[in-house]
Image (tube, rainbow, N blue to C red):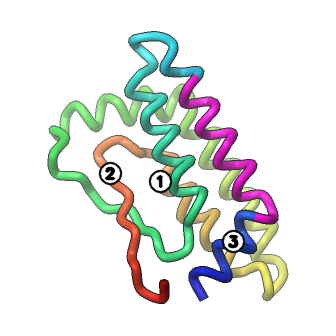
Amino acid sequence: MNILGNLIWLIFGGFATSMGYIAGGIVMMLTIIGIPFGYQMIKIGLLCLWPFGSTFEVNTELPGCLATIMNLVWLIIAGFWLAITHFFFGILLTITIIGIPWGAQHFKLAGFAISPFGRKVRIDNQGV
């Protein structure tokens, strides 16, 4: 199911969304200040490529205080708007029964987009 869900996701907008995140991340990396934020956008873009079977978890390698400060800056600059967009598309997709799995992926992406610092993406290989 994961492979089929991811292929349908890629065909109907996942690839374009992912490329948008990656392009935005590269543009943010043009300045030294934007490098950590650009890295987080690329991380979200990679999660957009293969969301079914992928989860995110707390990364214990990054200090909590630094991650909190970066998440606050991220939330003000981009995270709020990205999360609202994913939440909106999640609601639109869950209106129909067929769209519920894809809506759930948008809700997952909204949770990751709101605070990406201090989290890492884990890809489960079950069903592959």
Residue at label 3? 103
Q: What element does badge 2 sit on?
A: strand
Residue bounds of the magenta highlight: 11-26
The answer to whether residue 22 is magenta is yes
The image shows residue 59 at horizontal and vertical percentages of 23, 52
The answer to whether residue 104 is magenta is no
User: Where the N terminus falls, by quadrant?
Assistant: bottom right
- Indicate left or right for 19 with 68 as reference: right
Residue at label 1? 112
- Camera-side residue of 80 and 12: 12
The image shows residue 104 at horizontal and vertical percentages of 62, 73
> Mark 3 or mark 1, which has the lower sequence index?
3
> Do the numbered discs 3 and 2 sit on residues whose CB atoms are within 8 Å?
no
Count of numbered marks: 3
> Do the numbered discs 1 and 2 sit on residues whose CB atoms are within 8 Å?
yes
- Camera-side residue of 20 and 37: 20
Taking the view exactly as shown, the residue that stands out farthest to the top is 31
